[in-house]
Amino acid sequence: MVATLPEPGIIQGRFIRLEPLTRELLPALHAVIGHPEVFAGGYGGGPQGYRATVDEFVEWAETYYQWEGGLAFAIRIAGGPDDGTLIGTTTLGDLDPALEYAHIGWTAYDPRVWGTVVNPEAKLLLLTHAFDHGFGRIKIQADVRNSRSRAAIAKLGATFEGISRRDVPRADGSWRDSAVFSIIVDDWPAVCAGLEERVARLGANGPVVVN
């Protein structure tokens, strides 16, 4: 079975919704994720990739996000007093329907929602979207130095496949080793059940609030 490319559109969850990322949203996205602590763990090439100004961030984003060949999303809060508030971005990228392969990455959140229901539900929505379209293997990876992201990926139920050495350059000119994880279609029923349980548990106190 060959997978089919998902059409760009809104993916609605209980606590968040994903909508196509546009260039018009980049200044607002900078206000949300344009913080040194977001880049410290390896996002955007690591600490040296941090862009302090809106103009620098917009210029960098032109080549960083998958405007072609992937589905880049803005993440907004759904429901509650902060309904509609932009809180981050994620991408279902490197789409290869013939190989039934995709990659979830390019993910960053407002630090105020770290450790909340946001990341588990974002992964649940993207994985459901991918597997519903016939994809069979989803890769998720992180800089080998980023212990927080590696722990979060493992907690999703993804299988650690190993270290891809000298994988991509960091912004400081050094080469990143990537910790590679995957979720395949055979894993999906158990992973889905685990994510649904986490979303229900973390969301039990109500909507996401950032104020």
Image (cartoon, rainbow, N blue to C red):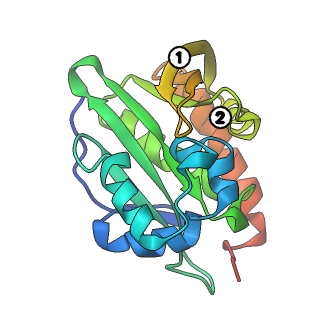
Compared to residue 39, the image places residue 163 above or below, namely above
Can you say which quadrant of the picture contains the N terminus? top left
Q: Nearer the viewer, residue 198 or 112?
A: 112
Pick the front one: 17 or 134: 17
* Residue at 54% in and 74% down: 31
Nearer to the camera, 138 or 74: 74
* Mark 2: amino acid: Ile
Which label lies toward us, 1 or 2?
1
Vertical order, 93 against 49 (above or below):
above
Label 2 belongs to which residue? 153
Assess disc 1: are there few (<14), some (14-19) or many (≥20) residues with their C-alpha within 10 Å of its C-alpha: few
Mark 1 vs 2, N-terminal side: 2
- Residue 185 placement (x, y as % from top left): 45, 23
Q: Tag 1's secondary structure?
A: strand
Picture coordinates of residue 91, whole percent (x, y): 41, 47
- Which numbered circle lies on residue 166? 1
Q: In this rendering, would 113 be left or right of 63?
A: right
Q: Amino acid at mark 1?
A: Arg
In the rendered image, residue 15, in percent from the top left (x then y), is placed at: 58, 66
Residue 115 x/y as whole percent:
75, 55
Number of residue marks:
2
> Element under label 2?
helix
> Could you tell me which quadrant the C terminus lies in?
bottom right
Image height check: is 208 above or below 18? Answer: below
